[in-house]
Structure formats: C-alpha cells, structure tokens
Image: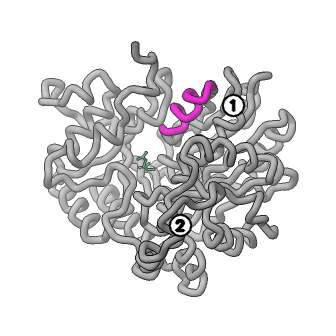
Amino acid sequence: RLKEGRALALDVWTIFSAVNLPADCINLGQGYMNFAPPKWVTEAAEVALHDVAPNHYSHPRGRIRLREAIKSFYGPQFNRELDVESEILVTSGANEGQYSVFTAFLEHGDEVIMFEPFFDQYLPSVTFNGGKPVYVPLHPPKDSVKKPTSDDWTIDVEELRRAISPRTKMIIVNTPHNPVGKVFTKSELESIATIAEEFNLLVMADEVYDCLVFDGKEHVRIANLPGMWDRTVTVGSAGKAFAATGWRIGWLIAPKSIIQPTLAASTRIVFCTNSPLQEAAASGLEQAKERKFFEIQRAEYEERRKILCDVFDELGLKYTLPEGSYFILLDISRVDFPEDYPFPESVLGRGRDFRACWFIATEVGVSSIPVSEFYCEEHANIGEAYARFAFCKDVDTLRAAAKRFQQLK
Ligand code: GLN
C-alpha cells in the first residue's frame, strides 16, 4: 500500500520536464541554466578527476579544500572565524543538507513553520522525517498595486506568532525566496528572530540565492542578528552560485551544536558528497572575489530579468518584479483556455494553473511552473493565479521567449 498524501504524488518538476513538452518549447520552467559554469571553475574538476584522492570518498564533513574555501569566502559575511571542523558541512546539494537537519532534529509530530508559498521540497523533506508543516502566509500584493515587486509580498508577524504551538521546533526562512523572489528586510528578519528566541526555535535560513539580489538591495543573514547564530543553520548552494545545479553540492554553516547531529544524519543518508566537484566548487569560491564573479553575474541576471519584464510590460501583463532569485511570477488568472484542450493526465485534477501553464507551454511555446505546487492543498487556490518563469537562461533564449509572447499582441 502506498503512503497517502501529497509527499509521494508526481512532482511538478517531472510533470513540466522538458521531455514531456513539445521539443521546440522554450524551457523557463525548472530553475536551471542553459549555459555552462565558468571554465576556471570546471577546470578544477578535470584536474581532480586525474588525481587519486578526489575520486574516492571524501570526509563526510566535505573535502578540506572546500571547507577552507567556504570559511574564507563566507566567514567575513558572518563576521566570524568559521571552524572548518565543526561549523561547516558540505552536503549533496542544499536539499540533502536540509533533509539531514530535519532528520537530526525532528521528532514525530514536531512542527516546522514555513512561509507560504514555499519551495515544494520542504514539504516531503519535513513529513518524511515525521514532522508536520505549518503554513504562515506571505500575503500577495493587493490588487490595487499596479506594478508589484516582491517586497509587496508581506508577512504578518502576529500570524507567525499565532502559528506557534508547544510542538513548534523550527522556522524555515527562505531569502531570497523561491518562487516569489522576495528579499526579506532586516526588520522582517528581526521580527522573526524575536519570535524564534522567545519560543526557543531553530531557524533554517535557506539562502541558496544569496548571490542573486538585485537593484542594490541588501541580503541580510538572519544568523547575524543578535543572539541568532546559536539557533540558525544557513544553507548555501554551489549550483546557484556557479551555474551548476547538477553537481549537487551545497553546504551548511551553523554552530557545532547543529552541525554535529546533522553530520551524523548526513553520514547515514549519503555518507559523503561527490568528491571531484567539491574541488571545483572550492576553486570557484577561491577565485570569485578577485574575478568579481558574483558582481558580474548579478549584472547579467539583472539584464536577463529585464528581458522578460519588458515583454510582460509591453503586453500589459501583471507580474511580481523579483528583487532576488531568478524567478518571475506572472499573474495568469485571466488566461483563458478551452477546458476540452488535450491536456495530459498529469495536469488534470490539479490546480487550474497546471492546465494554464500547460496551455501556455504548448500554444505560446514557453514553459513555466504552476505556483499552486508551492502551496498546501488548502491554500492552493491562491497559487493558481500565478505561473513562475525562470530567467536563469542565456540572453538569446530569453529574447526568443519574449518574441513568442510578443506574437500574442
Ligand atoms: N530549485 C529549482 C527550482 O525551483 C529546482 C528544484 C528541483 O528540481 N527540485 O526550479
């Protein structure tokens, strides 16, 4: 008998995978790049493959070169000398790192608060570990806001407070946020931190898009707020940083009290992370500053974002201008499609947005991700109003997508 519930249902990434869509559809669905990582990063993997040690198990904490690189690159951002033996853990992608934290800390029935919409992976990661997700809304922009930005998606601190129960163990704070692109302000994070302290909660700071913050907006790390280091685990990702989502290299930065049990869990889940690509990630972090890599990359992403925003503006379509990450939410509540359209079984019986996104992908030729997947079933109707377009693609691809939209005029 299959376990009941949503956690084992067909996931949105598989349904909207390029292999299921027409071959000429432009893929702005799942967030991965259609360009390679920089050569000066991948070169290190080539060297590693011709060596002996980096072809074998790494230490479950991660290869020392990568831990040293994380210490040097991120230490100053946390205003502390990170201890490579006890405060850094290399994981098989950010996902596995988060999963291991849940495995280490959740006891059956423990509640994990997440702001909704939430990155869909959190739900199964929490429930597979016996936890119970509790949702607190990120309120969508009011209809009266003509040109919303991700800042218009707001939290209500009293709602967060009311969501706390004696079983609450953890709050997930995802900034920059997937799928909204919201960059939480210092004052929002301070309110969350106050509540975390008051109720003695752990905070999982999913900051995998930390290098993608636009318009001069500041990325604030909740771990840096007074008193928060001891209860916060910050999650990072080489995939996002170096255009290498298939590497599955991520890391956790946290005090020993969090890293130690998480390391024990991670060792039992994957034992260690693939070794040669850790060398490449290390090489990336070692050179990033001198090459001004993240500054240049940020500017490139601003240009990519503009291509999609410009075409949506031209067509009078409403969207949320993201201040971080590489996603744009388009309001699709007024997209009409024939209900007898030849939809595949996989999108039938799901939210209206699944059908709308399928229709747009096949008729316009640009794919996206339906946003109800980032909501629990009870609140899915809120997400049905949006499609998420990823702009982590080269300029030519985004221009081609824009052209397809322009043909709708
Ligand atoms: N984080 C990526 C996205 O949101 C991919 C997620 C996944 O494949 N699980 O598009």
- Does residue 323 appear to the left or right of 217 in the view shown? left
- Circles 1 and 2: CB distance less than 8 Å? no
Q: Residue at x 64, y 52 (%)?
A: 184
Q: Quadrant of residue 89?
A: bottom right
Q: Residues within 10 Å of mark 2 (few under 14, many from 20)?
A: many
Residue 321 place in picture, x, y as percent: 46, 56
Residue furthest out toward the bottom: 290
Q: Earlier in the sequence, mark 1 or mark 2?
A: 1
Q: Amino acid at mark 1?
A: Leu
- Using the image, determine if residue 205 lies above or below residue 75: above
- Using the image, determine if residue 382 lies above or below residue 332: above
Element under disc 2:
helix
Q: Residue at x 77, y 58 (%)?
A: 86
Q: Amino acid at mark 2?
A: Gln
- Does residue 387 appear to the left or right of 273 in the view shown? left
Give the residues in magenta: 120-130
Q: Magenta stretch: residue 123 in it?
A: yes
Give the labeled residue for mark 2.
278
- Does residue 174 appear to the left or right of 76 in the view shown? left
Give the labeled residue for mark 1.
106
Q: Magenta stretch: residue 180 in it?
A: no
